[in-house]
Image (cartoon, rainbow, N blue to C red):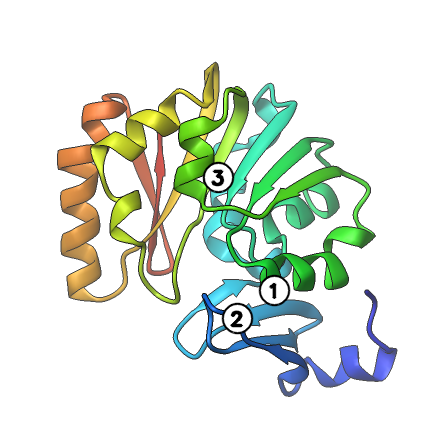
Amino acid sequence: MKQPLWKRIKSYFVDVHIESSSSVFNEELDVLLVKGEYQLVTPEAIYSYGNRYDNFFQAFKHIDIASFDIENVLILGLGLGSIPYMLERYFKRDYSYTAVEIDEDIIYLASKYVINDLESEISTVCTDALHFVNVDVGKYDFVAMDVFVSDYIPEEFETEAFLRSLSFRISDDGLLLFNRLYLFERDKKKTKAYFENVFLKVFPHGRYIEINGNWILLNK
C-alpha cells in the first residue's frame, strides 16, 4: 500500500504513525513510516524495516546473494515482509517464498502494506515455526531464520534439535541465514555460546557476519 506523497516526505523528518494493532502474541504492534519505508515495531524491538532492515540487507550484500542458485525460500518470522521486499525491489531477485508466521495480525499487516504490492510468489503459513519445521517435507535453497518475540528468541528455537530439524529443510547446496542479537553484553555472551556450542555442531563450516548489534549466522 503506497502512502500519500506528503506522508512519505514527512517521514524523512519525523516518524509517521500508520496503524496500531495487538494480538495474543504481541500486546502492541505499530506500523510506522520512517524515511520512506514501512517499519513494524513493538515497544522493545524492530520487527521489519523495508530496505533498511540492515541485518539482512547488509548480509545479502556481503555474501552477494545474486551469486547463489536460489529458486525457493523459507522465511521463519515474517515481520512486514522486509526479506522478500528487499530481495525483489533492491536485489532484483525472482524467488518463490514460503513465509511462516505464528501471529495472524502480523500476516494481515504484512499483506496490507507490503506483500500484496510485490510480484514475487509468496505463500504465508500461520503456524508455529517449530511445528512447521518438524512436519514440513520441503527443501529450500535459502532459509531465513528471523523468529523473535519482542527482543528475544524463544528457548525452543535455541536447541540443537531445532537446528538439526532446520538443516533437513535446506537443500544440499542451500543457504541458511540465522539472525541473532549481539548488542548488549548478555546478548553477546548468549549468541557467542550458541554459535560455538550449538550452531557449529550442526554446521561445522558455519560462520557469522556482525552487523549493527546483530550476528547473522551462516551454515557455510
Give the quarter of the image for residue 107. Answer: bottom right
Nearer-N-terminus badge (1/2): 2
Badge 2 marks a residue whose secondary structure is loop
Does residue 193 lie above or below 38 as drawn?
above
Q: How crowded is mark 2: few (under 14 residues within 10 Å), some or many (20 or more)?
A: few
Label annotation for residue 144: 3
Disc 1 to disc 2: CB gap under 8 Å: yes
Nearer-N-terminus badge (1/3): 1
Q: Residues within 10 Å of mark 1 (few under 14, many from 20)?
A: some
Label annotation for residue 105: 1
Give the camera-side residue of 152 and 2.
152
Badge 3 marks a residue whose secondary structure is strand
Q: Dividing the image into 4 quarters, which one contains the N terminus?
A: bottom right
Give the quarter of the image for residue 188. Answer: bottom left
Which residue is found at the position 35% from the left and 65% from the top? 151
Q: Distance between the residues labelled 2 and 3?
A: 24 Å
Q: How far apart are marks 1 and 2 (CA)?
A: 6 Å
Q: Dividing the image into 4 quarters, which one contains the C terminus?
A: top left
Give the quarter of the image for residue 34. Answer: bottom right
Give the camera-side residue of 156 and 150.
156
**Could you tell me the amino acid type at mark 1?**
Asp
Label annotation for residue 50: none
With 74 as the anchor, is 113 left or right in this view?
A: right
